[in-house]
Image (spheres, grey):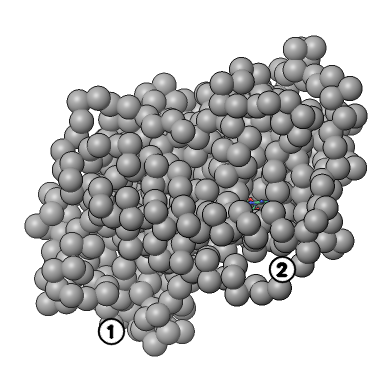
Amino acid sequence: MQQADFLVIGSGIAGLTYALKVARYFPDKQVMIITKAAADETNTKYAQGGVAVVNDLEKDSFEKHIEDTLIAGDGLCNEKVVEIVVKEGPERVRELIALGARFDKEKDGDYKLGKEGGHSEFRIIHHKDITGWEMERALLEAVSQQTNIHIVKHCFVVDIITQHHLGYLVTKATPDIKCYGVYVLNRATNKIEKILAKTTLLATGGNGQVYRTTTNPSIATGDGVAMVYRAKGRIENMEFIQFHPTALYEPGLRGQAFLITEAVRGDGGILRNKDGEAFMERYDPRKDLAPRDIVARAIDSEMKRTGTEHVWLDCRHFGKEKFTEHFPNIYEKCLSVGIDITKNMIPVAPAAHYSCGGIKTDEWGKSSIKNLYACGECSSTGLHGANRLASNSLLEAMVFAHRCYIDSVEKVNTDAKTSLPANDLANVPDWNAQGTTEPKEMILITQSFKELQQVMSDYVGIVRNDIRLQRAMKRLDLLWEETEKLYENSSVSPQLLELRNMITVGYLIVKGASFRKESRGLHYNTDYPGKSELVQNIVL
Ligand code: FAD
Ligand code: SIN
């Protein structure tokens, strides 16, 4: 059994930022970061476009960034949270720069600013087309210098520990569910161990892997959301899955697709259909730079109309020098698959990209479970509403990591009300693996994984309707039943745990989508094409 003062699950921008802040404030307290893969294998590392932030109050304004965020969010953003993130964002970015993160500059020393869909101004700071890689690098470097932070890699968090594990009945109606720490699968010993903590932060990222193609790496299986749901915590707005309009289309590809950043369209890239038509003009006056939900639906509609599996992104007019100055990584990736962007158009198709909903938090990142914060993509803070504005998520993660840190400091300094009774901690039982054996066939797990992705992509994608959602739910029920049997009888593996979590996340997406009898933001149901007068968040 291990114990930490601060337990952080996830080593992306949210987890690292929080860990660094609490570790610096409390040099004599121990901070443990647990991550199920290599430290840098995160959604953060793959972020391309950059961070949306108001840089220059003469050319841009907080009001405009707020308004762009609210328009994209289609009536469901929490306005107070939007204001917090937009106004606190610049300070958080300055802190990251002070840590050593580098963003591209003009010759005069000003930051180069990009533009993406839904933004009324150029305001996106970036590091070439590998912004996330640079931010992750700077944060990991700073973390490595902090002697009171311990990163445990390749260690899978299975469940959060609550009173349920002490033998109490815990339901959604239990008013004071508390988190005592987590059970983890130690991959070195293949045993499940408990780690206790007074403060736990979930920063487990997104869930793109629930779909057949996604811009997310394989770690993005919605584990944090599934854990909180199992622990009877509150989950919100899961139906709002953002599909990025332009992932590189590679025939037959399943899993992680390479992203072609929206910043390419910000710099003048044009979407064309099979016949070469710049079709976005027919869908929205903002054309290629309309918010993502509109562009993704337009592409989906063009693909269905023309019977193709992708559309084209035309950058031939850029010229090599201009393109490679901003997008050297995309240039190389395209060349590696035989596409010379100066001569050929890039085949692109939408792919699952971002989860706007997640673990419901208040404006300090507190979840509905005591001593448990949630931050970054796994959380639902109220910033994104029904559709996230491009490049607002790295910003949100930094602002909320800071807010979780502020609240944690206050909690520790004022403590009595939050400390966990020593008795409870001593009574947390070891994991019970009795009666389980090694699974005989991995194929049962891998096949169910594929089935889940197929069901979600076919029935719960960009365009939905009631029959498709009902079908999806039936298929998920069966997968759930089969997987639970496997879980009860088999010793656990990361693959089985991820499958179980993804089925839960799929269920939450379908459930949210079925409750929402309207089309709003990223949720488009052809049976209810208009917006309901009842503007509501769906909390499960
Ligand atoms: P992540 O960075 O995904 O980190 C999650 C961590 O949790 C990982 O360390 C993982 O191993 C760990 N973890 C998960 N489950 C477990 C478990 N069970 N046990 C232990 N550890 C676990 N946003 C922008 O604002 N601007 C952009 O330009 C941008 N571009 C993007 C491009 C791509 C290709 C992608 C995929 C996303 C992009 N986004 C962008 C979104 C943004 O990158 C993510 O929302 C953000 O990085 C999420 O950070 P995070 O810290 O919440 O999670
Ligand atoms: C992109 O670079 O297009 C992705 C930006 C984002 O998801 O915010």
Mark 2 or mark 1, which is nearer the start of the sequence?
1
At mark 1, the secondary structure is loop
Toward which corner of the image does residue 146 lie, by quadrant?
top right
Which sits in the foreground, 402 or 121? 402
- Residue 232 located left or right of residue 53: right
Q: Which is closer to the viewer, label 1 or label 2?
A: 2
Which sits in the foreground, 248 or 133? 248
Residue kind at label 1, given as amino acid type: Lys
- Residue 454 located left or right of residue 348: right
- Residue 143 located left or right of residue 457: right
Ligand 2 lies under 8 Å from the Cβ of mark 1: no
Q: Residue at x 59, y 32 (%)?
A: 232
Which sits in the foreground, 256 or 531? 531
Residue corresponding to mark 1: 343
Q: Residue at x 31, y 76 (%)?
A: 346
Q: Residue at x 48, y 57 (%)?
A: 478
Residue 22 vs 434, above or below: the answer is above
What is the crowding at mark 1: few (fewer than 14 residues within 10 Å), some, or many (at least 20)?
A: few
Q: Residue 503's x, y, as percent? A: 51, 53
Q: Residue 340's x, y, as percent? A: 35, 83
Q: Residue 231's x, y, as percent? A: 63, 35
Q: Is residue 127 visible?
A: no
Residue kind at label 2, given as amino acid type: Pro
